[in-house]
Amino acid sequence: MLGGMLGLFGILAHLVPLEERFGLSWLFHLRGPAVAPDNVVVVAIDQPSAVQMGLSIMPRLWPRDIHAQLIDKLVQEGARAIIFDLVFDVPSVLAETDERLAQAIRAAGNVILTERLVHHNAMVVYDQDRALSHHVIQEGSGQLLPVIADEATARAPFAVPKTDRVNHYWTFKAGAGDMPTVPVLALQLFSLPVYEDLIGLLRSVDPVAAEQLPTPEHKPDVEDVVFKLRHMFWGQPQLVQHMYARLNRDSALGPAKKKLLTALINLYASHDKHYLNFYGPPRTITTVPYYQVLDPGGYPVERSVSHPVDFKDKVVFVGFSGATQPEQDIVRDDYHTVFSNPDGLFISGVEIAATAFANLLENRPVRPLPLQGSLGMLFLLGFTAGMAFMLLSTRIAVVMGIVVLIVYVFSASYLFKESAIWVPVIIPVVQIVLAFILSEILKHQSVRKKSEQLETQLVEIRKSLGSSYPSKAIEQLLGNYQEHGIDSPCLTTDVAGYTTLSELIDSKDLGELISNYRNALKDPIRQHEGHIMDMIADSMLAIWINHPEHWLLRSQACHAALDLAAAVERFNQSQSDQRLWLPTRIGLHCGEMSLRRGDGSYNVVGDVINTANRIQGANKFLNTRILLSEEVVHGLDEFVTRPLGNFLLPGKTMPVHLVELLSARSLANQEQLWLCGIFAESLRAYHSQHWDEARHGFNKILGIFPADGPSRFFLSLCERYRNIQPISPWPICRIETK
C-alpha cells in the first residue's frame, strides 16, 4: 500500500511545475557554469557605452546611424550574421538616420531584425447560414518601419514565456501560423554555407521534396527556406531517420559540416518548445560593450574585455545588456533565470536569445524525459522504495536510502552535464525521504500495537498461570511465525552437580531450594525483556522477540546472561551451606525457531535450542561460566569477549565458533582486557602449531589466573601435540560427550 501511494504521489507531483521550478535549478547548480561557444558574441548596449558615447541609457533614443556604423564595422570584420534585439517600429526624428541604417542593412545582407509578438482578435465563422461565429486571440508580428524592415534579410520575434523565471522559449509559434523565431532564422542564416549540402542530402533520400526548396545558385530567402523545411520535416520521422542514416554514411562531409547539418535536421524535426541550456550567470557568453566595437582605440578599455574580439564568422547579437543594478532601474530588458545573481542582476533578453541560438548550433538544448517515461519512472521508484523500506530494518534502510539518493542524484547530474538530459530529481528525493519516514512510522505503530496486545494478554495469563509459563499471547503476537519461524536469541542454563545434590537433601528442601533459585533467575530475564519459555528442574530456556532490530535482541540476551550469572553468584553466597550452592552454566545461540503448542503450553523447537544446549554443556569441559556462538555477538562492541575457536559439539556435524562472554565493556577491568589480549596471541600461536610459544602464553595466564579453564584446556592440547601430530580437521576441537 505504501509503495502504491508513493508511486501515485510521484505521478501527481510531476503534473505540477515542481521539477521545472526547483529540480532544473538544482541540476544547473550541480553542473556549474559551462563554456559558451566562441562563435557567438553579444554587443552590449550598456551604461559604459552610453557614458563613453554621450548617449542616453535608453536604446530607443540612440541615433540609428550609430547602428549603421556598427553594422559596417561588423561586416568589415567578417561577421557571418548580425541580429538586432531592438524593435525599429517608429521613425526617427531625423529621417536620414533611418535611411542610413537601411543602407547599412542592405549592404550587409546578413541582418535579422526582431519584431514584437502581438495578439489580435480574429473572427472564425463555423456556419454561414446560422451566422455562428466567435472571436479568438491570434498571435502575429508587430509592424516594423518599412524603410528599415524591407532591407533586412529576415524578421522574427523572440518568444519567451511571461513567467517569474524563464526556462524555455519557442522555436516556432503555433498560434502565429508556425512562425519561426529569431534563433531559428539565425541558425539558418549561419548555415547557408552548407545549404547546398543539405539539398544534396535531401535529394539522395527524397528527390521530390528536394525540388521544393530554392536552388543554391541564387541567394535563397531565409524565411522561405525555414518555412519549407519546417513543413517538410515536421511529423515525418521516416524522412528524418533516412537523412540521419545517409548523413552518418557520407564520408565526403567533414565533422563540422555534419554537426551543422545535424543541428538543422534536429531543429526542424523537433517540437517547438525548447528548454534553455544556460551556460552560466549574466555575461557568460562573450559580451563586448558597444563603444569598444565602434572604436576600440578611441575609448578606455573596459576591465571585463581582456582582449580584442575577433568577429570573423561570428554570429553577433546586438541589444541592451545591463551590467549593474542602477542601469536596470532605468530600463529593463532582463529575465530571471536559474543563474540570476542574488543582487538582482538578471540575464538580458539579448543574451537569452544568444543562448537559444548557441543551444541550436551545438544541438544541446536541455532535453526532458518524455512524459510517459517520467511518470513510469516515478511510479516505479516510489513503489519500490515504499516496499523495500517496509521490509528492511531501520539501520539498513538508512544506509540504503543514503546510497540510493547519492547514486540517483549523481546519475541525474552526470546525465545533465554530459548530455543535457533532464530527469526528475526533486520528486525522487522527496519520494525516498517520505518512504523512509512513513515506513518507520508504520513499523513503529505495528510494533507498538503488537507489544500492547502482548502485554495485555501476558498480564491476564500471569494471573492464572504465573510468569514462568509460556504465554498464548506470544503465539498471537507472532502468529505468522508459526509458518516462517522466529529469528531469536536463545539462552539455556543448567546446574552443575544437580544430580549429586538431589541425593544429599530430601525432596522438600530440594523443592524449596530450586523454587528460590528459579526466582533468582527470572528477574534478569524480565529486566532485559526476555521470555522464559521453559523451566524444568534445574534447567531454563528463554528467548527474545519483542524488538524488530535483531542486534538489539542479541544485546539484551547478552546483558541478561551477565546479570543472570551475577544473580546466581548472589544466590549462592546467601546459602549457609556450600553444598547447597548451584553453580550455573549458561549457553547462548541465535537463529530460527518455531512456536508449537502441546499439552496446553507453548514451546519453541528447533536446532537452535539443541545447539544452545550443546554450547551450554561445553562450559563443563572449558571450565567457563557463559559461552556463546560467534553469531550472537557479531557486530556488538559493547561486550568484552574471548574467542575460543571452532568446536565440534556432540551430535553436530558442523563446527561452532565458541566465544566466552566476560563482561560489559563499560564494567570491564584491566585484568580482563589483559587476559583477552594474551589469550588471543597464545591461541594464534596454537593455531600456527608454534607449541612452545603457545605454552609460554597459556602458562603466563595461569600464573595470574590459576583456575582459567580455556588456558588449561589449550595448554593440555599443546603438551599432547608436541609429540603427536594433530588430528584432522585442524584446528577444530572435538567435544566427545555432552
Image (cartoon, rainbow, N blue to C red):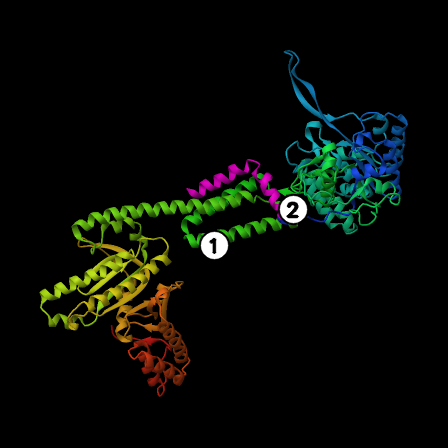
Q: In the rendered structure, does residue 399 fall within the stretch colored magenta?
A: no
Amino acid under disc 1: Val
| CB atoms of marks 2 and 1 within 8 Å | no
Rounded to the nearest angstrom, the CA distance separating label 2 from label 1 is 30 Å
Q: Name the residue under label 1.
A: 399
Name the quadrant containing residue 510.
Answer: bottom left
Q: Which residue is drawn at 56% across and 42% down?
A: 373
Question: Residue 57: x and y, percent?
Answer: 79, 34
Q: Name the residue under label 2.
A: 420
Question: Residue 133: x and y, percent?
Answer: 64, 15
Question: Residue 205: x and y, percent?
Answer: 74, 42
Q: In this view, does 380 lie to the left or right of 361?
A: left
Q: Which residue is drawn at 30% across and 80% down?
A: 706
Q: Residues within 10 Å of mark 1 (few under 14, many from 20)?
A: few
Q: In front: 599, or 505?
A: 505
Does any portion of residue 695 appear in the rendered image? yes
Q: In this view, does 424 lie to the left or right of 317?
A: left
Task: Label the magenta part by its dominant secondary structure.
Answer: helix
Question: Residue 99: x and y, percent?
Answer: 89, 29
